[in-house]
């Protein structure tokens, strides 16, 4: 959403038009949050009040990040496509880093269950046949 908004701002589209386009193309929970923000801004609410209404509705993290990225453009009226693009790149890096940390933690958590499942199989299929082969006297009796 942030990259799309940055491209609309770079093309010269006003912020309220960009929010309207994003709201129409988003999934239902995001759509309701963006529509409430746009409606509040159209009615004259301040930037903080409009985005606080979206956060009170339980909107997703991406909508809150979009609000943070657009704060400079919304409060000053300055074209800030570069700021929004940088914010989007930073958001992607944070999400990738968090996914890598979760994947590393998953590897650690899987060691015990895999050990408990594979160790008995290794003993039954690897160690016991070798021990039986070492003692041929027990197998002939």
Image: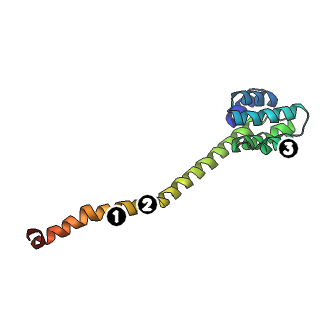
The quadrant holding residue 54 is: top right
Mark 1 → mark 3, Cα distance in angstroms = 58 Å
On screen, 138 above or below 16?
below
Q: Name the front one of labels 2 and 3.
A: 2
Q: Do the residues under discs 1 and 3 have CB atoms within 8 angstroms?
A: no
Q: Could you say where residue 19 lies in the image, as x and y percent from the top left? A: 77, 31
**Residue 72 falls left or right of residue 118:** right
Q: Nearer the viewer, residue 80 or 133?
A: 133
Q: What's the colour scheme?
A: rainbow
Q: Is residue 56 above or below residue 128?
A: above
> Mark 1, residues whose alpha carbon is within 10 Å: few (<14), some, or many (≥20)?
few
Determine which residue is flagged by label 3: 48
Quarter of the image where one finds residue 33: top right
Question: Mark 2 — residue?
Answer: 113
Where disc 3 sits, the SS reads helix
Residue topped by disc 1:
119
Q: Secondary structure at mark 1?
A: helix
Question: Would residue 57 be seen by someone viewing this image from the given angle?
Answer: yes
Could one spot residue 86 in this view of the protein? no
User: How packed is label 2: few (under 14 Cα within 10 Å), some, or many (20 or more)?
Assistant: few
In terms of secondary structure, where does tag 2 sit?
A: helix
- Pointer 2 with pointer 1, Cβ within 8 A: no
Say which label, 2 or 3, has the lower sequence index: 3
Q: Residue 90 in the image: x percent, y percent?
A: 66, 46
Front residue (pair 126, 95): 126
Q: Residue at x 25, y 61 (%)?
A: 125
Instruction: Give the number of the disc on residue 3.
Output: none
**Extreme residue toward the left, this view:** 140
Mark 2 vs mark 1, CA separation in Å: 10 Å
Residue 14 screen position, x and y as percent: 81, 28
């Amino acid at each position: 959403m942030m990259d799309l908004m940055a491209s609309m701002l770079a093309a010269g589209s006003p912020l309220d038009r960009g929010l309207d386009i994003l709201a129409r193309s988003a999934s239902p929970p995001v759509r309701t949050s963006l529509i409430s923000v746009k409606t509040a801004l159209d009615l004259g609410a301040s930037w903080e009040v409009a985005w606080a209404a979206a956060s009170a509705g339980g909107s997703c993290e991406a909508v809150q990040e979009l609000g943070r990225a657009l704060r400079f453009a919304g409060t000053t009226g300055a074209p800030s496509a570069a700021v929004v693009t940088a914010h989007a790149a930073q958001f992607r890096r944070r999400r990738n880093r968090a996914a890598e940390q979760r994947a590393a933690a998953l590897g650690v958590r899987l060691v015990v269950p895999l050990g408990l499942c594979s160790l008995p199989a290794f003993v039954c299929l690897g160690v016991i046949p070798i021990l039986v082969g070492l003692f041929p006297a027990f197998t002939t009796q």
